[in-house]
Image (cartoon, helix red, strand yellow):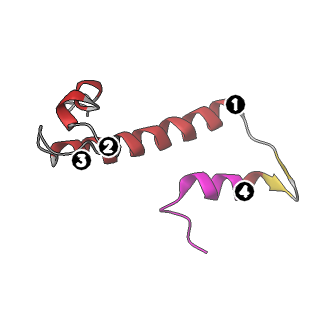
Amino acid sequence: MDYSERPFQSTLEQHSLGDKIRIDRGLLKALLDKQHMAFAVILVDLAIRTKANDPCICSSGKRFKTCCAPLIDLNAP
């Protein structure tokens, strides 16, 4: 199976021994940072396409400009 699109799953499969997983803390942190960045990119993409007076992307029922817009840095890399 090709895990090139899912690096976290691929790394876990490579380091698993039955029910146990052994992984270096540095590698785990790098994987989690990559995962967080992927979520941030999706969030910024959603925010860019949302107008200020649209319902918020978090489904709170508030307007985007008064809910999540101030929390999102649209200039993120």
Q: CA distance from mark 4 to mark 2?
A: 30 Å
The three-letter amino acid code for the residue at tag 3 is: Asp
Residue 5 vs residue 67, the one in the foreground: 67
| Residue under pointer 4 | 14
Instruction: Residue lying at the far top in this picture: please name it.
Output: 70
Marks 1 and 2, the one that precedes in the sequence: 1
The three-letter amino acid code for the residue at tag 2 is: Leu
Quick check: 75 above or below 11? above
Marks 3 and 4, the one that precedes in the sequence: 4
Residue 10 vs residue 64, the one in the foreground: 64
Q: CA distance from mark 4 to mark 1?
A: 15 Å
* Residue range (magenta): 1-13
State the mark number for residue 25.
1
Asked if the magenta segment contains residue 5, the reply would be: yes
Mark 3 near mark 4, Cβ–Cβ under 8 Å? no
Q: Which of the two marks, 4 or 2, is nearer to us in this view? A: 2
The three-letter amino acid code for the residue at tag 1 is: Arg
Quarter of the image that includes the C terminus: top left
For the residue labelled by badge 1, is the local secondary structure a helix, a strand or a loop? helix
Judge the density around disc 3: few (<14), some (14-19), many (≥20) Cα neighbours within 10 Å.
few
For the residue labelled by badge 2, is the local secondary structure a helix, a strand or a loop? helix
Residue 10: x and y, percent?
62, 58
**Residue at image x 59%, y 51%?**
8
Q: CA distance from mark 3 to mark 4?
A: 32 Å
State the mark number for residue 43.
2
